[in-house]
Image (spheres, rainbow, N blue to C red):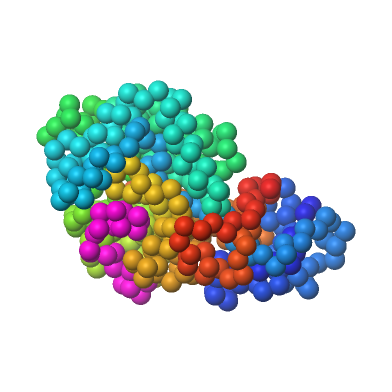
Amino acid sequence: MPVLFNATVATMAEGGAPYGLIANGALALRGAAIEWVGPADQLPAQFSGDEHFDCGGRLITPGLIDCHTHIVHGGNRAHEFEMRLGGATYEEIARAGGGILSTVAETRLAKDAVLLADAARRVDALMAEGVTTLEIKSGYGLDAATEMKMLRIARVIGRTRPLSVVTSFLGAHAVPAEYKGRADAYLDEVCIPALEAAHAARFVDAVDGFCEAIAFSPAHIERLFLKAKALGLPVKLHAEQLSNSGGAALAARFAALSADHLEHLDHEGIDAMKAAGTVAVLLPGAAYTLRETTLPPVAKLRQAGVPMAVATDCNPGSSPLSSILTAMNMACTLFRLTPEEALAGATRNAARALGLADRGVIAAGKRADLCLWDASHPAELSYRIGFNPLSERIFGGAL
Ligand code: DI6
Ligand code: FE
């Protein structure tokens, strides 16, 4: 049973020192779990004969968790990046059949092996920065076969790489061209049957939707969520990203794990999320890419005590970002989170946003998903830009 010693441990446990910091800490691991954590001078004698690893004063944090990604997708949208720089808006491009629908066309055509290889490069970039748990959404198929293909590839990534993958069914991401103006028919004829089939194949861990003027109304999302509930699946929602449509309050009514984006969230949404325990997932990569000037109401979320998570939203359109550390930096600089909130956002609160009670903090009984950093204080993780101080990544107790 390995013992890690001579480390600064940021447990991220709530209620104690900032970051749950232990200056001269030690950790005892047993199999895939943490058996003991505390000050090195209090290490119980039972561990003294075990193999000891000197961490050389490095920082240990929980493994990082990216709780919102669209990392499996065909092609890229660099040409839309050029169009936006030329003055077109994200919504104009979407309404003209570009945007999400152009990635749908590429994802439908893409061979499994190509989708997998492309996604794997981005997954590997996240893992190289210490990500040990990753959420992956479908939503670029919008037909049953391609939604299944995306989710199957997400499961393959989770089986073949040392990280946990959690999937979300995002069939209600956009109305496909063949159902233009017929969102209800799309839900009845494609989206809901595809959800049932993917659920039967055990490909779905949660149900997500895009509640927005250019996508689905709250009434549409409610129908989808009723089906999710009937299947026993938790829900989450892309809400109030480009405008306020009451999606966050709707999600809260369904006890959603999270409501995500939230730039246009109002106080009713905040109160509903607080009451339901719904996590606010902040996606600064999308706000940055779209040069969004309305920021999520971070001060009000903080004041209300709504837990905040931070994720990359890795996707080919609004957030082509494969760096969780950059997302944390952006959360601080653009959204005014503290570095402690940013790290909690990629550990403790990200775990909560995925409904995973077994990770996100360093404590006895939790999974031994850990990062060792060449850093002396956890604020350094959010502070640098384009620099990776990861020294070791431990997944389920394995280096
Ligand atoms: N909001 C987003 O930021 C992504 N999906 C969504 O509902 C963007 C997806 C894309 O532009 O491809
Ligand atoms: Fe998203």
Q: Which residue lies furthest to the left in this view?
A: 181
Foreground: 302 or 73? 73
Q: Does the magenta stretch include residue 8?
A: no
Residue 275 lies, in percent from the top left, at 35, 64
The boundaries of the magenta stretch are 283-303
Residue 131 lies, in percent from the top left, at 53, 50
Q: In which quarter of the image is residue 334?
A: bottom left
Q: Quadrant of residue 262?
A: bottom left
Residue 238 lies, in percent from the top left, at 29, 50
User: Which residue occupies 18% across, 41% down?
Assistant: 94
Left or right: residue 339 compared with residue 253: right
User: Which residue occupies 45% across, 52% down?
Assistant: 323
Foreground: 84 or 227? 84
Residue 188 seen in this snapshot: yes
Foreground: 86 or 266? 86
Q: In which quarter of the image is residue 181?
A: top left
Left or right: residue 157 compared with residue 94: right
Against 226, is 42 above or below? below
Against 365, is 146 above or below? above
Q: Is residue 296 magenta?
A: yes
User: Which residue occupies 62% across, 62% down?
Assistant: 374
Q: Residue furthest right?
A: 49
Against 233, is 291 above or below? below
| Number of numbered discs on residues | 0
Residue 253 seen in this snapshot: no
Residue 35 lies, in percent from the top left, at 72, 57
User: Which residue occupies 32% across, 23% down?
Assistant: 109
Against 330, is 166 above or below? above
